[in-house]
Amino acid sequence: MFGTIRKHQTWLWAIIITFTIISFVVFFSPYSKLNTDQGVVRLGSISGKPISEEAFIHAQREAMLQYFFMSGGRWPDTDAERMGFDLERETYQWLFLLQKIEEMGIHTSSEMVVQVARNMLSQFQSAGISTPQAFEEQVLREHGMRLSDFQRFVEHYLGVQQLVSTVGVGGRLITPAEARELWIRENQEVSAEAVFFETTNYLDSVKVAPETLASYFTNHLAEYRVPDRVEVKYVEFSLSNHLAAAEAELTKTNLDEVIEMNMQRLGTNYTRLGATPELAKAKMREEFIRNRALMDARRQANAFASTLFDTQPARPENMDELAKARGLTVKTTAPFSRSEPPQELQLGQAASAFATAAFGMNLTNDPFGGPIVGENAVYVLAFGRRLASEIPSFEQVRERVTKDYKEQQAATLARQAGINFHRTLTNSMAQGKDFASVVQEARLRLVTLPPFSISTRSLPGFDQRTSLNQLKEIAFSTEPGKVSSFYPTADGGVIMHVKAKLPVDEARLQAELPEFLNAVRQNRQSEVFNNWFRKEAPIALRDTPLNAPRTPPPDLNAAPATKKS
């Protein structure tokens, strides 16, 4: 249900200062190493203090709640496992932090706990959660939790924030003068021009002999191997079918009041949603309606899936029969691999889950998957067919092989031309000629780059030629007034002339410096805290099962990836 609220996580964490202390590793059952042969649970100790079973269970629930809120409403599952989430490790690290909070005498006011809890839950109103009791009934109880677990989590989370501030206080010791220098280093722009040696300019110079092409194919067989693929049948539950009803239902509620409350909470940050308050409100309203529609689509998909999964014997044809009875359409994807989910579906962040579910199905005992929540629809899957990996014949891929060969040879020609020109350029400029005139004499194209700085996030029109990060690296490692070396790029190569560093915009500097100073202090504070954590936690946790030999992880490819519910 709450996977649909992912888009609101930015709003949610604008309320609470976030930090990163937990390293994600492989996920195992929380009790994978805790049971002895006699069935006795051994939880170990932290800094010599034994861990009670109650404390462990509480910490485990809080670790799950932290994942839930930081992932935008998703609980730890097989996707979390594949991303490296380890509930056991998270639990022990959380216990370590709680012990440090107690040792340092850190306390959180009940008023702050109530305020933050209320703000966190308000983000789920678009999904029909308007009270703490509704959150308990519709979300927590399904995972064996109560409202008291959520309240304890908020209290401890705020305590950890204070712990970060206490331990990392030294990182905040930076003067405005130091911050000013850092701002200038990151934001002062350079004026530069460049010559790009692009592969496309040399394609016509490549000669392709049949025997050479055949040899190229033989030497690169692995690149042309077609991976394992599957086709799956699916029923699509589109949110567009629920938008009108969702809008009508939300109009009956206090939607306008909720939007106003969120606008007040965002303050001037509303511009991330729209240039004006009116546009921001409209966008927010659109998202609330969209999330409600997607929730309704998921509810419909769950009902369909529940009937489908309960029908015995389980066989893919059951989907066709059930869909026909309910007036729904069964579609079939084109063959796709694990790394390239079906392009005809807008899966977004669910692409990995879709592929995992598809490859986890089989004809004999597990023919169904989903529901999978995509960008604009929810999908219930049925096994179609599996296509084994194969190497196509040369004739089948001749066109692709020809293209690849020509591009490889053209890139070599482009880079050789760049190296040769740089030699000419160096000699000519040593004789007093300027960069532009040498480029003109060589009949090459001189490109004037837009001004950019280390903090520039995009350079329209130039990102396709080479990566922006590489352009930055070249520009800021070349002395102003000088010419860079020839740098190979993915598309050939480039030589850059850094003309000058541009004057700093003093008005912009003064306007941005306070926020920049605060950001630097927070980053350094987090860095100090993380260094402390990496040093202290392994020592404190050495007498826990985390130091026991790891049990090999289960074969995830042999098990269904998506819970049938």
Image (spheres, rainbow, N blue to C red):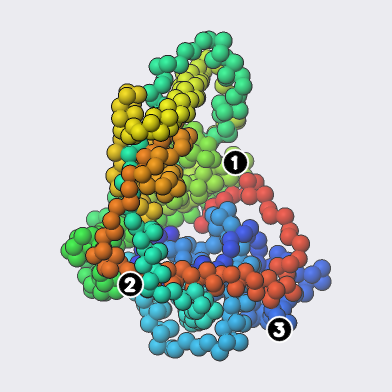
Q: Position of residue 565 (x, y in %)?
A: 51, 57
Residue 228: x and y, percent? 58, 34
Q: Helix, strand, or loop for circle 1? A: loop
Image quadrant where residue 338 sits: top right
Number of residues whose C-alpha sits closer than 10 Å to that of mark 3, classed few (under 14), some (14–19) or many (20 or more)? few
Identify which residue is drawn at 57% across, 32% down: 227
Q: Residue drawn 51% across and 44% down? A: 355
> Taking 210 as reference, is 291 above or below it?
below
- At label 2, which amino acid type do we have? Pro
> Mark 3 belongs to which amino acid?
Lys
Q: Which mark is residue 281?
A: none
Name the residue: 68% across, 82% down.
52
Residue underneath mark 2: 514
The numbered disc on residue 49 is 3
Q: Nearer the viewer, mark 3 or mark 2?
A: 2
CA distance for labels 3 and 1: 49 Å
**Which of pointers 3 and 1 lies earlier in the amino acid sequence?**
3
Secondary structure of the residue carrying tag 3 is strand
* Spatial separation of the CA atoms under disc 3 and disc 2: 44 Å
Q: Is residue 293 left or right of residue 539?
A: left
